[in-house]
Amino acid sequence: MGLTIGVDIGGTKIAAGVVDEDGNILATCKVPTPPTPEGVIDAIADAVRTVSADHDVEAVGIGAAGYVDDKRATVLFAPNINWRHEALKDKVEQRVGLPVVVENDANAAAWGEYRFGAGQGHDDVICITLGTGLGGGIIIGNKLRRGRFGVAAEFGHIRVVPDGLLCGCGSQGCWEQYASGRALVRYAKQRANATPENAAILLGLGDGTVEGIEGKHISAAARQGDPVAIDSFRELARWAGAGLADLASLFDPSAFIVGGGVSDEGDLVLDPIRKSFKRWLIGGQWRPHAQVLAAELGGKAGLVGAADLARQG
């Protein structure tokens, strides 16, 4: 199969792109994410028609945040769009006249990194995305492992603290409450409130108040040597690395790929994640260690991965 289209559904925008067999994006289109579930489907179809106007494409892959069934056709549950057992494949196919494959967005991003990014050369890869929440994907034996019902790799909702912080999923102590962009902001606010004298740079980048601290401020302040910002990244990394050590016990991959907005800070966050991973890896002094790698495709991983999964059929 030649050219395919990848679609990445975000909270504010829907991105579509024509992708070739080498993972190159030949044309792109972005449209605002409509407020209604049916409007989102229409917007996906419009974006597909726009990017395919000057290209002969053969299939469409869609990355959706939520649970996707084992047939890669129905979105069982997507809280941000309010989809419940949404027959997304059939509805988009009816509108665009092309075969459609639906995949969880984190799985699509993981596949993109495995095929065209940091995972090249590895047969067994675990990907995690440290964004607002925490997602991931499993590639073992060169295959995307989705589980019997299609909803595997929801790493963010592994419970790491019994009776811990309340999560948006309704449970308590989920990993993403301790290793995510949301967690990073919480750590920084707690530390800035306790020792404002150590957060002068951080507070100065916002509105001067603890409540005004945002993720972008923490990143900028850490690069300028702000103690609170740096310590906040270290706390996030401690939880992230410990979680990777647990995943190593489960899957024994040759590499972990860390993506998402938090990972954009590079070694500022990756070096302490590697140290934490080494610290918590059971039997670490006697066993081989998986590499902990930075994702390479950035925000286009999901689009490229979804397009390639459509090519796989």
Image (tube, rainbow, N blue to C red):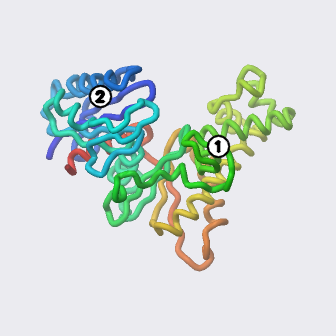
- Against 269, residue 253 (above or below) is below
Q: Residues within 10 Å of mark 1 (few under 14, many from 20)?
A: few
Residue 271 seen from this side: no
Quarter occupied by residue 52: top left
**Position in image of residue 85 (x %, y %):** 33, 38
Element type where label 2 sits in the image: strand
Above or below, 209 relative to 305: above
In terms of sequence position, does the residue under pointer 1 or pointer 2 come before the other?
A: 2
Judged left or right of residue 205, residue 139 is left
User: Which image quadrant for residue 189?
Assistant: top right
Is residue 18 left or right of 261 when viewed as pictured?
left
The amino acid type of the residue labelled 1 equals: Leu
Report which residue position mark 1 lands on: 166
Relative depth, front residue between 31 and 233: 31
Q: Residue at x 36, y 42 (%)?
A: 76
Mark 1: which secondary structure? loop
Q: Estimate how packed mark 2 is, as few (under 14), some (14 to 19) or many (20 or more) residues with alpha carbons within 10 Å.
A: some
Question: Percent from the top left, x then y, of residue 149?
Answer: 34, 54
Q: Position of residue 199 (x, y in %)?
A: 80, 34
Task: Name the residue located 59 percent from the left edge and 58 percent from the top edge.
Answer: 243
The residue nearer to you, when weighing 48 against 226, is 48
What residue does disc 2 label?
Answer: 28
Tell me the amino acid under the disc marked 2: Thr
Q: In the rendered view, does 109 fall on the left or right side of 158?
A: left
